[in-house]
Amino acid sequence: MEADEHHKETHMQEWDRLSKGTFWDYLGSQVETVDERHVVVTLEVKPHHHNLIGIVHGGVHATLLDSAMGLLAMVNRPGCKVVTTNLNMNYVAKSSTGRMIVSAELIHSSRTMITAHAFARMDNGDLCAFGTGTFRVS
């Protein structure tokens, strides 16, 4: 295994360990791909992800997008604390079953701030939500 691949695998194992018993763990999402420019997380939609009208709750979308972008920021600043300072969400279509795929990409990075965008799509390609996030690095 190359050094970069080993480093990524170590990060993913550490995130998996740290997520036990957290909201991320409760949601049941998985980190699929991680590098300095791109993060992909997935979620098998279950009934506990639904709101009262039977579609995926907007907070689930927001959590997945925020988390994917936050992981991207963490990868770009290993060893630093990264917190969300702004999250802008756009909801475009309902979803209720299937596999959701969230893809986050880096937009801008400065000494103290990182900005990213992310898209939540169902496994058939339908766009459900998208957003941007800004993260403070310390």
Image: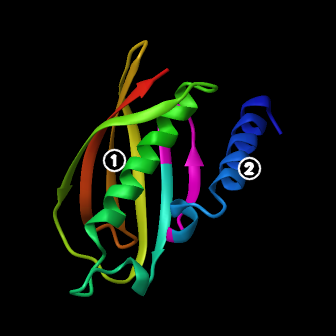
- What secondary structure is found at the residue carrying circle 2? helix
The 10 Å Cα crowd at callout 2, few under 14, some 14 to 19, many 20 or more, is few
Q: Mark 2 vs mark 1: give the one in front.
A: 2
Find the residue positioned furthest to the front. Answer: 21
Taking the spot 66% from the left edge, 61% from the top edge, the residue there is 20
The 10 Å Cα crowd at callout 1, few under 14, some 14 to 19, many 20 or more, is many
Measured as percent of width and height from the top left, residue 92 is found at 16, 64
Eyeballing the image, is 15 above or below 3? below
Eyeballing the image, is 98 above or below 15? below
Chain part drawn in magenta? 27-39
Taking the spot 48% from the left edge, 69% from the top edge, the residue there is 43
Q: How is the image coloured?
A: rainbow
Which residue in the protein does label 1 denote? 118
Taking the spot 58% from the left edge, 65% from the top edge, the residue there is 25
Measured as percent of width and height from the top left, residue 100 is found at 41, 68
Residue 75 image label = none
Eyeballing the image, is 4 above or below 87? above
Q: Quadrant of residue 80?
A: top right
Taking the spot 41% from the left edge, 57% from the top edge, the residue there is 64
User: Which residue is nearer to you in this view: 21 or 70?
Assistant: 21
User: Which residue is nearer to you in this view: 132 or 21?
Assistant: 21
Closer to the chain start, of discs 2 and 1, is 2
Q: Is residue 129 visible?
A: yes
Question: Which amino acid, by three-letter code, is at mark 1?
Answer: Ala
